[in-house]
Image (cartoon, grey):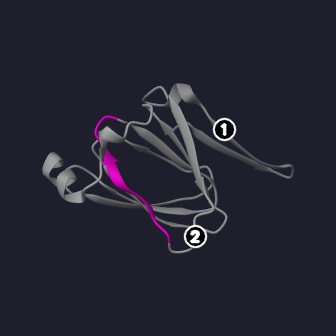
Amino acid sequence: MGSTLHVDSRGNLGVFEFQDLPFTPVRFFWIFGTPDGQGRAGHGHRICSQFIFSQQGEIDIAVTKPGGQLLKITLGPGDSFHLPPMHWLDLVSFSRDSVLGVLASHAYDRDEYIESKLEFEQLTS
């Protein structure tokens, strides 16, 4: 959905078609230069949807859905994942060259984060 990777002798071209997204992005951020063994995220969002995608390299992610179901996914270049609100995200590991892009449905608001796994479990069980 939304993300396409074109590879030929001239190099790689990644494309994201916004009309295919389930929300209108209002914020974009990216994560790169993550040290070996360092995870990121470890939180959920109350109202923000995110579309996360690998722009380069591989990123291992773990998503806990409401009710506790755990999804483990490896995103490679051009791969993407829609993260709805009320899901818990752990960015588990990054390849050395990885660049992770995130399109978010809302502007940054620290108050809408769920930072405790216990609180997340209470809210979603």
- Snapshot quadrant of residue 3: top right
Q: Position of residue 76 (x, y in %)?
A: 58, 58
What kind of residue is marked 2?
A: Pro
Q: Can I make out residue 111 in this image?
A: yes
Q: Residue at x 36, y 41 (%)?
A: 110
Principal SS element in the magenta part? Answer: strand
Q: Nearer the viewer, residue 109 or 27?
A: 109
Q: Which mark is residue 118?
A: none
Q: Position of residue 73 (x, y in %)?
A: 44, 60
Task: Point out the tag, 1 or 2, that comes first from the N-terminus.
Answer: 1
Find out whether residue 49 is within the magenta segment. Answer: no
Q: Residue at x 32, y 48 (%)?
A: 44
Q: Position of residue 11 (x, y in %)?
A: 81, 51
Mark 1 to mark 2: distance in Å? Answer: 27 Å
The residue stretch that appears in magenta: 38-47
Q: Which residue is at the far bottom?
A: 37
Residue under numbered circle 2:
35
Q: Residue at x 63, y 62 (%)?
A: 33
- Snapshot quadrant of residue 72: bottom left
Q: Is residue 64 left or right of residue 53?
A: left
Please rate how many residues cluster around mark 1, counting C-alpha atoms within 10 Å: few if below 14, some from 14 to 19, many from 20: few
In the displayed structure, 56 sits above or below 49; it is below
Task: Classify mark 2: helix, strand or loop.
Answer: loop
What kind of residue is marked 1?
A: Val
Q: Is residue 45 left or right of residue 79?
A: left
In the displayed structure, 21 sits above or below 33; it is above
Residue under numbered circle 1:
15
Find out whether residue 43 is within the magenta segment. Answer: yes
Q: Can I make out residue 84 in this image?
A: no
Q: Position of residue 112 (x, y in %)?
A: 31, 39
Q: Nearer the viewer, residue 33 or 61?
A: 33
